[in-house]
Amino acid sequence: MPRTRPKPKPAKRWRLFPRNPVYQFYVRGTQLNHWFRRRVRPPGIALMILVVISAGAAAGNAETPVFQSFSLVCGLMMTALFLTLFRRASLEAVRDLPAHATAGLPVTYHVSLRNLRRRPLKRFQLQETPPDPRPDEATFRLSEEPGEKLRNVFDRKFAYYRWNWLYEKRLSFDGGRSPVVERLGASGQVAVTITPRRRGLVRLNDLRVLLPDPLGLFQRCVKASSPPTLLAVLPKRYPLPRFELPGSARFQPGGEATARHAGATGEFTGLRDYQSGDPLRLIHWKTWARTGKPVVKELEDTFFPRHGLILDTFPATGDDDLFEDAVSVAASFVVAVDAQESLIDLMFIAGRERVVTAGQGIARSETLLEVLAGVESSPVEDFDSLGKLVQRHSDDLAGCLCVFAGWSPSRAKLLQRLNRMGIETSAMVVVREKPGAIPRCHFLRSSELAADLMKLPRRL
């Protein structure tokens, strides 16, 4: 028989980043804290503290009342834990989600439940758990909390505040607990309220049933069988005063297709023979009855002002919060502009050039909000491509409103380029501190965004 050579041992693979004990401590600690809070209620935490206190008192004191107190609290804890074992549930759940939610505002949806056990389920709650917000090790190592350099050596070494900042930043929503349901038979509905923290898509895939013991100290946590669902969260919007967008002299014909969808028509100009594809509502029935052949009314073209909404997707390093505020400002103007009387072209660069139009007869403003809900920042600044994109559509635009995440010479150069094209422009610049006055630029402080928006002049 031919000899077979032994397989060589695989070479050891060295990790790019060796395991960080501080990161592992935070990961395990957060996991343990999450597990503990799901199963121990606040009275149970108080009872566990009493157990520790009474045990310490009994260790140095031989009096009977001390031992009686220790026995009482231990007996209550053991009884509650034993009764928790008898709380069981088996539920199928289907979420009935709304079409949209808004970042920062609570949204309530209903969960249809079906009890798979013969006995009714008594006294329970539903808890919607967000996706795991713990950052990976590379993100934890390479990220830097705002103001971290000002902390002392101990805080910088153990990076607790960095971990907490990343954890809170990645958390999808707050809340998620339903009211206490006293009894559920074969089926029923339960309302759940959550508050999304940021725009985008929120994945709901972890619905739990909380079953407290009769003493209310501990609770069992059972996962309900439910299909995963996605909730679209629109950007936060702010109220705006009455305003006029830049540019009002140019109007674009809506065309027959636009008028057909929107129902808006111009003045009557005459009659012509019917052609295939003409809408039935334009048929002149009296003339058809008199002549015996179909005739339609001719209407003059309808005209609508068309505005460009330019979104800056090139925030500087550390200015991600300014970019989120810029998206909220753009969404506020989308809602405030009367889309029934104008067209809006949302333009930005996100990996590729994007132009989305909404307005009279084309799409509703919700379309632009959905696009803004999913827009992401670009890692490389490219205002030259953004300027070329606007230039290709300059002949159709009455004016442009630019929304910038910060201020820089490249952004000022883009405004100068648009002005040289003959486009009337105005800029909303989200900053941390206001610089000096610049013509046609309105600086909005991120800390006072709502107040600064309400101070905008009528003519932007």
Image (spheres, helix red, strand yellow):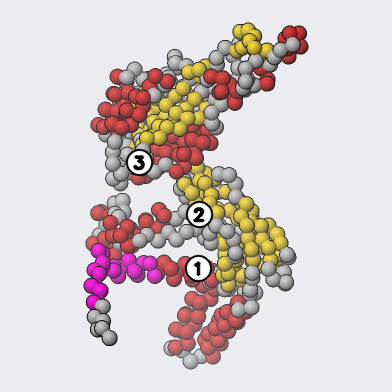
The one of 222 and 385 positioned closer to us in this rendering: 385
Give, as a three-letter code, the residue at label 2.
Answer: Arg
- Provide the residue designation for mark 3: 351
Give, as a three-letter code, the residue at label 3.
Answer: Gly
For mark 3, give the secondary structure. loop
Q: CA distance from mark 3 to mark 1?
A: 42 Å
Q: Earlier in the sequence, mark 3 or mark 2?
A: 2
- Provide the residue designation for mark 2: 203
Identify which residue is drawn at 54% across, 45% down.
101
- Provide the residue designation for mark 1: 37
Give, as a three-letter code, the residue at label 1.
Answer: Arg
Answer with the quarter of the image where residue 142 lies.
bottom left
Q: Which residues are magenta?
A: 8-28
Answer with the quarter of the image where residue 31 lies.
bottom left
**Numbered badge on residue 107:** none
Identify which residue is drawn at 57% across, 48% down.
107
Identify which residue is drawn at 45% across, 39% down.
372
Instruction: Give how far across and how far down residue 248 sits, in percent.
Output: 45, 17
